[in-house]
């Protein structure tokens, strides 16, 4: 399974990318979308308020099951991928690209270093 | 000989016993890219390309399902019918050879042991098809309630079962059998040759709501993979796709068919589960009859109902509370999904009988939100 090395990962099967503007993009991994199967919609419940690490910020509904989304690091959700409203299948088709879910403003950007590397994550799911 | 040795041996034995079984199609599924899950003690495909695509293939063209994990018991001899009449709720005496019947076994308190299909193969030979997850329990129940000593054989490990379902199913299968399929009406079957193998039970039954067939064959007499390959060979050009348990579940839910373990169980009786139509209280005595008659006379306190969500983006799931319009909890969801065909959230659950009328407004508690829904008699799609 191809997990881009420039991303950081969590045990909850999410990925995070720190962008040049200081925001971090979050999505679910290829493994996660494969486990969930066809995704029906993504719901973001917590918008614009600072959340702690591991707090639930939304849910992913697949045909068969529903799964919660946990914030990988402390921060504030500031943007939602509007394309997912009409095309939730983007999460299945391109989990590390077009299928991203939210952008957050990290409270402490250094927290990102505590997340898993692609190699460490690959070991978890192997 | 140390205690440690015993522990070691027991661990190995447990490991072996808990290993999920595989059907003869396991390698075929893997090669087709299936994601496998443990279901009823078997490693089964949950999906290949995706539930949505497989579901649509069955509704529009055809799908092939490996359901070899189901259990098959053969009941034989001049006491065969008497045993079935004793342990099941439907009237098996109404069957003639070549006919199948949806049926259920109940405990004395009316709770459901399992739902099943009875096939009358000959005057003195029947096949019972039971749920995979209930095989051992069911066999024990049948054996322990057989005072007439009918011959009971469990051929579950020998029998394979493929379901080919969808509007193109008949056309595809007709290419590999000489048995005229158009003459096989719903819940009847023929025994004929398929892909060159004799003795295949070709049954017009299924769990999808589509025209289709279930094909039972003994793996010692017919080559499972050759049959699969023949169906794929003629099916794929017609739009047939392998379909997994995921699509099987969304297809059956659109039709409102009950699933044992979700919608029916030992804690539900056939009357409240809407299976009064198979519960023949006047056929003579059978296990559970007395209690079921009482429930029917008094009227069940709760009923298994279908419902449709009023909002698209709310999917009911097993365990969610069902509420009245005024906000009282009146039941719980037993099965739910988004209908692939209509896009609406649909489900089933038990509600207090006064809320079971068609069109009654209810609410489903989806996480932290109470979403409006209405009672609807299945199917949830136009058939």
Image: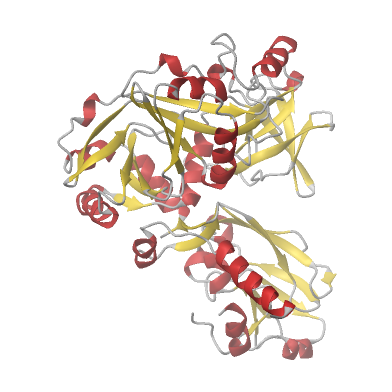
Q: Please tell me in which quadrant of the rendered image residue B356 appears.
A: top right
Q: Is residue B257 visible in the rendered structure shown here?
A: no
Q: Is residue B148 visible in the rendered structure shown here?
A: yes
Relative to B53, is A69 above or below? below
Of residues B133 and B383, the one nearer the viewer is: B133
x then y, percent, for residue B298: 75, 11
Q: How is the image coloured?
A: secondary structure
Q: Residue at x 17, y 43 (%)?
A: B176
Q: Please tell me in which quadrant of the rendered image residue B285 appears.
A: top right
Q: State which quarter of the image contains the C terminus of chain A.
A: bottom right
x then y, percent, for residue B105: 58, 28
Farthest front residue in view: B1
Q: Please tell me in which quadrant of the rendered image residue B31 appears.
A: bottom left
Q: Residue at x 59, y 85 (%)?
A: A123
Of residues B344 and B218, the one nearer the viewer is: B218
Relative to A97, is B342 above or below? above
Q: Name the side, left or right, on which B13 lies relative to B150.
A: right
x then y, percent, for residue B303: 69, 24
x then y, percent, for residue B313: 63, 47
Q: Name the side, left or right, on which A78 lies relative to A96.
A: right
Q: Residue at x 76, y 49 (%)?
A: B367
Q: Residue at x 63, y 68 (%)?
A: A101
């Amino acid at each position: 399974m191809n997990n881009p090395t420039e991303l950081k990962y969590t045990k909850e099967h999410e990925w995070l990318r720190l962008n040049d503007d200081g925001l971090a993009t979050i999505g679910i991994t290829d493994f996660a979308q494969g486990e969930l199967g066809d995704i029906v919609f993504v719901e973001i419940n917590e918008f614009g308020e600072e959340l702690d690490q591991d707090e639930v910020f939304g849910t992913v509904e697949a045909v068969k099951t529903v799964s919660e989304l946990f914030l990988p690091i402390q921060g504030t959700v500031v943007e939602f991928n509007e394309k997912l409203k009409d095309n939730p299948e983007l999460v299945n088709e391109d989990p590390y690209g077009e299928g991203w879910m939210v952008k957050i403003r990290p409270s402490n950007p250094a927290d990102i270093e505590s997340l898993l590397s692609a190699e460490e994550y690959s070991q978890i799911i192997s | 000989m140390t205690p440690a040795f015993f522990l070691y041996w027991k661990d190995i034995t447990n490991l072996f016993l808990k290993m999920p079984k595989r059907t003869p199609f396991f390698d075929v599924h893997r090669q087709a890219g299936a994601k496998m899950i443990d279901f009823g003690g078997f490693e089964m495909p949950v999906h290949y390309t995706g539930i949505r695509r497989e579901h649509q293939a069955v509704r529009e063209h055809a799908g092939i399902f490996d359901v070899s994990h189901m259990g098959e018991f053969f009941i034989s001899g001049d006491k065969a019918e008497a045993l079935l009449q004793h342990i099941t709720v439907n009237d098996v005496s109404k069957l003639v050879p070549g006919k199948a019947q949806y049926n259920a076994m109940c405990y004395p308190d009316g709770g459901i042991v399992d739902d099943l299909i009875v096939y009358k193969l000959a005057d003195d030979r029947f096949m019972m098809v039971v749920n995979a997850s209930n095989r051992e329990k069911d066999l024990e129940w049948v054996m322990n309630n057989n005072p007439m000593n009918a011959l009971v054989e469990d051929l579950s490990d020998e029998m394979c079962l493929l379901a080919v379902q969808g509007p193109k199913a008949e056309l595809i299968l007709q290419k590999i059998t000489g048995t005229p399929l158009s003459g096989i009406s719903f819940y009847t079957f023929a025994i004929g040759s398929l892909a060159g193998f004799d003795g295949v039970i070709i049954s017009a039954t299924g769990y999808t709501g589509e025209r289709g067939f279930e094909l039972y064959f003994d793996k010692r007499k017919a080559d499972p993979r050759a049959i699969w390959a023949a169906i794929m060979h003629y099916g794929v050009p017609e739009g047939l796709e392998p379909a997994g348990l995921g699509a099987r579940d969304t297809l059956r839910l659109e039709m409102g068919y009950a699933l044992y373990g979700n919608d029916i169980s030992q804690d539900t009786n056939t009357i409240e589960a809407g299976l009064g139509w198979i519960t023949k209280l006047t056929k003579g005595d059978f296990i559970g009859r007395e209690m079921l008659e009482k429930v029917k006379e008094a009227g069940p306190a709760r009923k298994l109902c279908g419902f449709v969500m009023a909002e698209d983006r709310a999917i009911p799931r097993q365990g969610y509370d069902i509420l009245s319009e005024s906000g009282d909890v009146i039941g719980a969801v037993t099965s739910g999904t988004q209908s692939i065909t209509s896009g609406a959230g649909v489900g089933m659950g038990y509600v207090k009988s006064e809320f079971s009328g068609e069109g009654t407004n209810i609410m489903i508690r989806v996480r932290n939100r109470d979403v409006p829904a209405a009672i609807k008699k299945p199917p949830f799609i136009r058939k």
